[in-house]
Amino acid sequence: MNASDSTNANGLNVLIVDDDPIAIEMLDCFLQEAGYNVEHAANGKQALEKIRTFSPRIIISDVEMPEMNGIELCRAVRERQSTQYIYFILLTSHSDLKSVLSGLDSGSDDYLSKPFHHEELRLRLEGGRRLLMLEGRDMMIFSLAKLAESRDNDTGTHLERIREYSKVLATELMNWPKFECVVDAQFVELIYLTSPLHDIGKVGIPDSVLLKPGKLTSEEFEIMKRHTLIGGETLFASATAYPETGFIKMALDITMKHHERWDGTGYPFQLQGEQIPLCARIVSIADVYDALTTKRAYKDAYTHEDAVRIIYDSRGTHFDPDLVDAFAIVEEQMRAIRARLDVTPPVVAPIKPKRKLLETELTAPVFTPL
Amino acid sequence: MPTTDTEIHTLPPILDRVGFLSRCMGNQALATKLAGVFLGTLPKEQQALELAIETIDLDEVRRIAHRVRGTAKNICAVPLAEAAFLVEHAAEQRDVASLYAHLETLKTQVEAILDELASGAKIS
């Protein structure tokens, strides 16, 4: 087993830090039996050296140690610029409140009393693993979305903006009595996490269509519309294989239905009104706002004011009227996000003469021509 | 809390062998290995403790006593853990007078546990 591979099938890398050789032996034996890769250090200083080569995902550290104690070690770990989060458990015979608070204040995630109870340690490690998996999940979701986006050469920081716009809109809806049963903090977190997946199905669209700089023919447009179904099928397969991963349901709704329109003229299912899931209605408005305010090879960016006007004009046709009203409340936040994340990508497609916006040319949505 | 006369007069064993084996997840080889490590380190810890007391280095006394307490708990040597706690506490309180008295108790417990382990009785 490769000790430096923290993602192998059997387990994570765990670093034990303790100056008591018996405690180390006991933990080592327990952790190895549980399938973890284990290394140890006798104090904080040794542990910091070990971290450079061993790359632990979990550290179980005693508090009271010579040279550098567990609390100092935890602080040093948190101050490091690390690409991976390290789950930190302090293990000590100190059990008074002051020690517990001091340990948690240093940035430790958990605190266990010595002598450790095997079952308790096992369960706490499971908690740590779950947290680390969530970190990996969020990163993988965004990476996947970025990969899909990378085929489309002029979208820049589109995904970063979409998730921010969606979050702002959803957060506003939390205050609306009509939505309070649906939109809570978890909904906001999930839409932030999953909205970047909205166009993931574009990986299945041929370059000749996806990268075509000019107007799509009606046949090409039909092909382009398939990205909602391609993305949906991919996520549906994931949802079936991993039914316990609840966030895929929202990702699925967004991916398949963010081109539906309130009046039933969207695609792929021509859903109407509240038949369209709320998350998809939110991403729809976010996506159009971003498409309008983004410069393309074939068009200049609309000003914020013009984009807002177009969205207001689409109230009750393209967009949910409530969401347009919510948009009106947060439009300044949208402008701020646009300004903060406005990284104009290099234009690589041939520049066409400036002309009127065409329905099929927005990254997003079927849109009422100006 | 003890509820019967029998319980009141029952002192914890020098080494709770069943408890120790259980902490080793029933792994006899591990228990024997740890007992060996303990036999090797405890006399050194005691020596270091006496030196620290001689030089009135109370922080060091507290640290060593704390470590001995942790180790003793790990191998289920409850009387030794309790004696180590008294030394640790006295050092923390800067109570040098009590420290000497508690050190004697600790030495007695160290001797007892070393005898117990050296007797070669199987941990089971």
Image (cartoon, coloured by chain):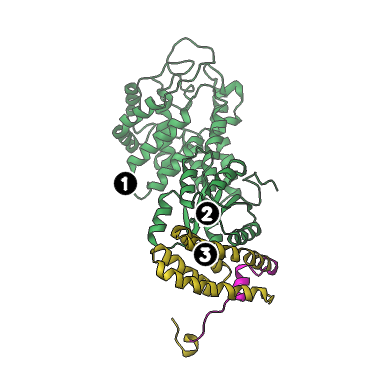
Chain colours: A green, B yellow
Residue on which the image places disc 1: A178
Kindly tell me whether residue A276 is visible in this rendering. Answer: no
Q: Chain of mark 2?
A: A
Q: Is residue A171 magenta?
A: no
Q: The C terminus of chain B appears in which quarter of the rendering?
A: bottom right
Q: Chain of mark 1?
A: A
* Distance from Cα at disc 2 to Cα at disc 1: 49 Å
Inspect the image, locate mark 1, and give the three-letter code of the amino acid beneath it.
Lys
Secondary structure under tag 2 reads strand
| Dots 2, 1 in contact, CB < 8 A | no
Q: The N terminus of chain B appears in which quarter of the rendering?
A: bottom left
Number of the front mark, 1 or 3: 3
Q: Position of residue A98 (x, y in %)?
A: 38, 58
Respond whether the residues carrying marks 1 and 3 are from the same subunit: no
Residue on which the image places disc 3: B50
Secondary structure under tag 3 reads helix
Respond whether the residues carrying marks 3 and 2 are from the same subunit: no
Dot label at residue A61 = 2
Above/below status of B7 relative to A48? below
Res A368 → quadrant: top left
Q: Label 1 crowding class (10 Å Cα cut-off): few <14, some 14-19, many 20+?
A: few
Q: Chain of mark 3?
A: B
Number of the front mark, 3 or 2: 3
Number of the front mark, 2 or 1: 2
Q: Residue furthest bottom?
A: B5
Q: Residue furthest front?
A: B54
| Chain part drawn in magenta | B9-31
Q: Which callout, 2 or 1, points at the residue further toward the start of the chain?
A: 2
Secondary structure under tag 1 reads helix
Q: Label 2 crowding class (10 Å Cα cut-off): few <14, some 14-19, many 20+?
A: many
